[in-house]
Amino acid sequence: MANYLLGIEAFTTPAKLECTKLLIKKFMAPDGIGAKCHQYLMDKREAEDNWAYDYWLNDMYMDVRLPLPINSNPGMPMPPVRFTTVHDVARFAAVILSGILKHKELIDSGNLPIDRAGSREKNQPLCMAQYYRPLGSCRIPGEQRDSQHLVQRAAKTDEHVIVVCRNQMYCVNVKNSQRGRISMSEIASNILYVLSDAPCLPNQPPMVGLLTAEERTSWAMNRKLLLQDDINQNNFSLIENALCLMCFDEPLPNSFNALTFTGATPTGHMVGDRDDTNMLHEMIHGGGSSFNSANRWFDKVLQIIICTDGTWGINYEHSFSEGDAIVSVIEKIYKNLDEAQSACNSVPADPPPERLSWNITSEMEERLKQAAVTVDKAVGDFDLYVYRYKGYGKNFIKKCKCSPDAFVQLIMQLAYFKLYGHLVATYESASTRRFLLGRVDCIRASHKEALEWATAMCQGEGANVPLESEGEDEDTRKVKFSIYNKDKLRELFRIACTRQTEIMVQNILGHGIDIPLLGLREASKKFNNGKVHELFAHETYKTANIFLLSTSQVATKSDAFMGYGPVTPRGYGCSYNPHPDEIVFCISAFYSCEDTSTTRFAKSLKESLDMMKDLMTDEAVDKK
């Protein structure tokens, strides 16, 4: 509880902080329920592999009713490739699928190497459960709570993937229980069949994939209606048990490019008129019903997306694993692309892939039309910007003797403060894989030390900005500034950086606050007539869990980058990827929120990063 107060003091008014302290005192009093809740969790820990896992999974994913694209599923463009003919596309797809199969065989054999911690209890083994979940699994919508379809691993079984082209779905076999893995050449032939067959079909297929992009309760009810038909039932079985989806897209037009601001024009990957932002749109949502959003099944854990112009990447359902497990597999396949692709040629395969047909009632046709309207509205509201900062990268940061992650997190606090004059609840994911079934806890970067440093950095830029509520007096709402020299600014930065690192270490070693608070909140229902204790119903706790800045570092070895949407209508999503000499930010918001703008936030990031270069250059001089 002491750490909880430290975690919220930077963005909570003094009056609300005092109220929270009183609620904590009541919760922890001898006649309160705090001790009972704590003991309940201690007993739960002894009885279960991971006492927190179901609480966390339901709270983070299964109980959330928002649509998966934009709100939950990340997208990741990989470095583009070059296609000359449709045969190149088929060969490329076959190499990717062959790499997926090799990884599946490694998993099935039990020979997947165990990851180990690189620091902080170095070499400690890390839980590998996330690597075993993605292939063949699928999220299942529920009217109140979703569930997960997890396949059982077996070495000698048939394996298939679902290939989607022009909204047509095909079942493509990739492994036979009798003769084993199907060759790359045969897979390429099957892919070529799909790419040739789908564009020639006379009838527009029902765009069932759009339903997976809807709000979860609506999708659950529509799924139930579709399952009343035997043919549709078989389709669901094939899709949900497939290793993955492979989606062949038409490229999005360059009208999806983000607006740019002076000094931050699109850089990096360019495919024709398409830039990084355009390609990330393709991977996150597909562009709407007129483009590729129906060419998806967003419940499927892994969707590999390939465009005819050489743009490619993935979309993945987040509830089964964190990004690291997915990225490592895809990047390993990408690393071996050139060698494998040159050895792959199409040879005839028999029988050809089976196309999935759907029986759609007139009522369902109307629901599909409504789904198209809903999806298009969501896509139109999605403000996305991929910004590559070229001033420096992690090499410079390391010369400053700073953790690149802590440095970038504080930069984001400064960028937010420069725009709004105050800090907000900030989420950064921290891996808890040192524990069985561990996923993530929350590093809260908006702490008092970060606020003091950001305030000092903005000396002379002050504004009269409300914290979070009306009713405070004028003096309370003012942000006060003092004039500091560079030495004092560097001192405040070091203090903030040290605090940020302390919070990170607490989290990865299992001493974060958010998962224990979640456990106490849920346990309190058992001792409070089914309702959460007033501590967790209070506005301060709710505000602390509305992350107006949701962030994560997604490091890649290649020039790939991963992005996602905000977790609240008034907030920002911001992933970052520090390279040696640049930092890639994937910034997201919603146009419907007048207070947010990805291009303004990117501009503030640039200004903040430039300010730090000026501040820290003397510190970054190489010492012989």
Image: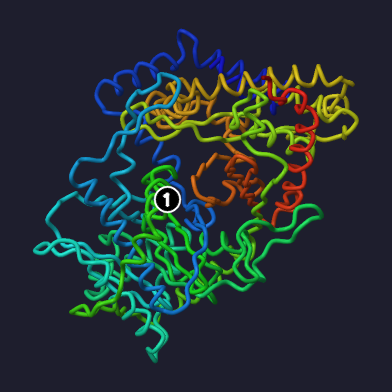
Residue 535 at what x, y percent from top left?
A: 54, 24
Q: Is residue 406 left or right of residue 471?
A: left
Q: Residue at x 70, y 46 (%)?
A: 390
Taking the image as drawn, is residue 448 in sight?
no
Mark count:
1
Q: Quadrant of residue 253?
A: bottom right
Residue 440 at what x, y percent from top left?
A: 44, 34
Front one among 223 and 410? 410
Residue farthest to the front, as pictured: 624
Q: Residue at x 54, y 39 (%)?
A: 553
Residue farthest to the bottom, as pictured: 202
Q: Residue at x 40, y 32 (%)?
A: 530
Q: How is the image coloured?
A: rainbow
Q: Is residue 462 left or right of residue 241?
A: right
Depicted 255 relative to depicted 553: above or below: below
Residue 581 at what x, y percent from top left?
A: 64, 41
Q: Residues within 10 Å of mark 1 (few under 14, many from 20)?
A: some
Front one among 399 and 19? 399
Residue farthest to the left, as pictured: 178
Which image quarter is the C terminus in? top right
Taking the image as drawn, is residue 197 in sight?
yes
Q: Is residue 467 left or right of residue 395?
A: right
Q: Secondary structure at mark 1?
A: helix
What amino acid type is highlighted by mark number 1? Answer: Glu
Residue 307 at what x, y percent from top left?
A: 48, 70
Q: Mark 1 = which residue?
A: 331
